[in-house]
Image (tube, rainbow, N blue to C red):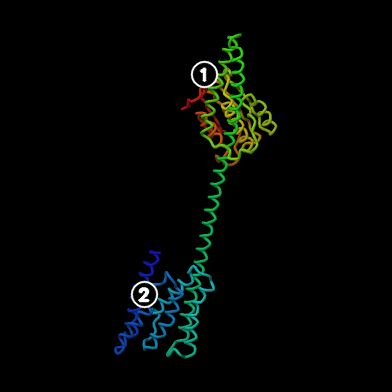
Amino acid sequence: MIDSARRAFAVTVVLTAVFVASLFETGGFVQTNVPIDLVLLALNTMPLLALHLNPLAVILTLSVAYPLWLIAGHEASLFQSLPALVALYAAGSWGRPLWLRAIALVSPVWMFVAAASGWWADADLLEIGYVAVMFALAWALGVVLAARRSYTQQLEDKTSALEKARQELAERAVADERARIARELHDVVAHAMSVITVRAGVGAHLAETRPAEAAEALGVIERTGREALSEMRRMLAVLRDPDPRGPRVEPQPGLDEVPRLVEQVREAGVVVAVTTEGSARPLSAGLDLAAYRVVQEALTNVVKHAPQARASVTIRHLPETLEVEVYNAGHITGLVVPGQGMRGMAERVALYGGRLDAGPSDGGFRVKARFPREPGEEVT
């Protein structure tokens, strides 16, 4: 609003100077009516200060003020028509309904009719008609630019709305993924608590009669309890499903199910080779699930982006870490943009202190996840 007022002020100053300069061409002020001439001069220029507020009122005021200037005995000048020309353009580009802006066309029509009727003494009808056409064109130019500005604003608003909707969908997808992870971890912990409860009962029953078996039960309780506490801490880091009446999810598969997953991918036309390195060691249920999901999502991306390709799955059981790697050696169709699947993989890996690396490699695409075997540790 301040910028618009400044522009209106600058336009007023410039056009007032032009109007005054035109007096040297037309004979200047009437010596006997200088005060009246000054008032009429102000009426023909000062309304421009309100261009940013109501250009329609400005042009209607000028349509009355300029004939009064001529009636006072002054000769007409094309330079003196510039205030009305600017006001007509501003009225055409005004952000109001078209029917309201069209009222501004009264000015050129009124000017042409006055000249044609002979009311305007010594008027050159051709010259007046030319000026009237210029006035109408100035108004039309304002209308066109206003329509273009409105169209551009609509596009910007739609783009902003689409971007907001996309962001909301992305956030919802992340929240859904976290809720699903929370449900899966809940089932894992519930299973661990059941084992602890059963083993505790057995240990209490055999504590006096079979101390060796009781000690074994206590060992199972300790190991299972540590895993369950680790799962509980991780579960607090994600969102729970706000709807407790939603369907319960049974414990999910682990790396033992990779061969069956590979067979499904092979049926889709992708040749997959599976390699296991190192000696397999027991994994917590949550870690086993996270590693399986990484392999599943990576192979799914292979099927989507590199059909009829060759892929390899490598599972490395290292002393301190577990690594799963999926490499696609085929041609990737189109541009692979990280989406919700990739984000879900990264969150699963980070949940267990691991590290995920994914991107082009050796002419193909490689996904590699490293998990620490001990709870609470992180892979650097």
Of residues 101 and 278, the one nearer the viewer is: 101
Of residues 204 and 27, the one nearer the viewer is: 204
Q: Amino acid at mark 1?
A: Pro
SS assignment at label 1: loop
Q: Which of the numbered marks, if any, corresponds to residue 176?
A: none
Q: Amino acid at mark 2?
A: Leu
Q: Quadrant of residue 83?
A: bottom left
Q: Position of residue 371 (x, y in %)?
A: 52, 26
SS assignment at label 2: helix
Q: Quadrant of residue 252?
A: top right
Q: Position of residue 267 (x, y in %)?
A: 70, 32
209 relative to 45 in the view: left or right: right
Between the residue at mark 1 and the residue at mark 2, the CA separation in whole angstroms equals: 85 Å
Q: Which of the numbered marks, if any, corresponds to residue 15?
A: 2
Q: Residue furthest right?
A: 267
Mark closest to the chain's N terminus, 1 or 2: 2
Of residues 378 and 149, the one nearer the viewer is: 378
Q: Position of residue 65 (x, y in %)?
A: 40, 82
Q: Locate the N terminus by quadrant.
A: bottom left
Identify residue for label 1: 319
